[in-house]
Image (cartoon, grey):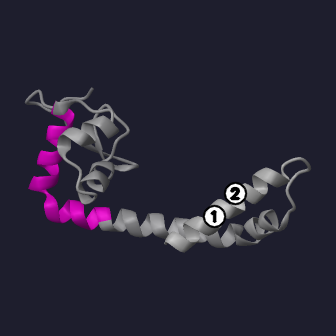
Amino acid sequence: MSLSSNGQAAIIRTERGLTIAGTRITLYDVMDHLVAGRDPKLILNWLPLTEAQLDTALSYIETHRTEIEAEYQEVLRTAEEIRQYWEERNRERFAQFAAMPPKPGQEALWAKLQAQKARHATKS
């Protein structure tokens, strides 16, 4: 793990963005959990971090709130653009899959799946 000069876990900038040193976890990953309203102790259950690493990340986020928020919003915009691109690009292919009949012997499973989808759609 990379350490800053004071012996604490460090935040470094990589090609992925602001990252907790010694991990592949970005501050944007931590922000996802914070925005979802998760408690820091719960975040430790979701992300493979030590308490010191998470504390460093949370301190950095708090100290640089404006900068981190702006970068986080940009990351979210980029992710949405990428999602929309691939959804549009694969729309025709997904329609082809949906139009395919079930494989022989799987008709009962297919009918059960369709019934579950219909029930789920009415609940929403």
Please tell me whether residue 75 is drawn above or below residue 1 in the rendered image.
below
* Quadrant hosting residue 50: top left
Is residue 23 found inside the magenta-colored segment of the image?
A: no
Q: Is 32 on the left-hand or right-hand side of 10? A: right
- Is 108 situated left or right of 80 in this image? right
Image marks 1 and 2: residues in contact by CB distance under 8 Å: yes
Q: Where residue 55 appears, x then y in whole percent?
A: 14, 39
Q: Which residues are magenta?
A: 52-72
- The relative height of residue 59 versus residue 72 in the rendered view (above or below) is above
Res 99 quadrant in image:
bottom right
Residue at mark 1: 117
- Residue 61 belongs to the span the image colors magenta: yes
Q: Nearer the viewer, residue 69 or 117?
A: 117
Which residue is at the front of the view, 83 or 36?
Answer: 36
Residue 5 is drawn in which quadrant?
Answer: top left
Q: Position of residue 115 (x, y in %)?
A: 68, 63
Amino acid type at circle 2 is: Leu
In the image, residue 52 above or below residue 56? above
Residue 117 position in % (x across, y down): 63, 64
x, y percentage for residue 30?
28, 49
Residue located 59% across and 66% down the image: 119
Label 2: which residue?
113
Residue drawn at point x = 29 percent, y = 63 percent: 71
Dot 2 alpha-carbon crowd within 10 angstroms: few under 14, some 14 to 19, many 20 or more: few
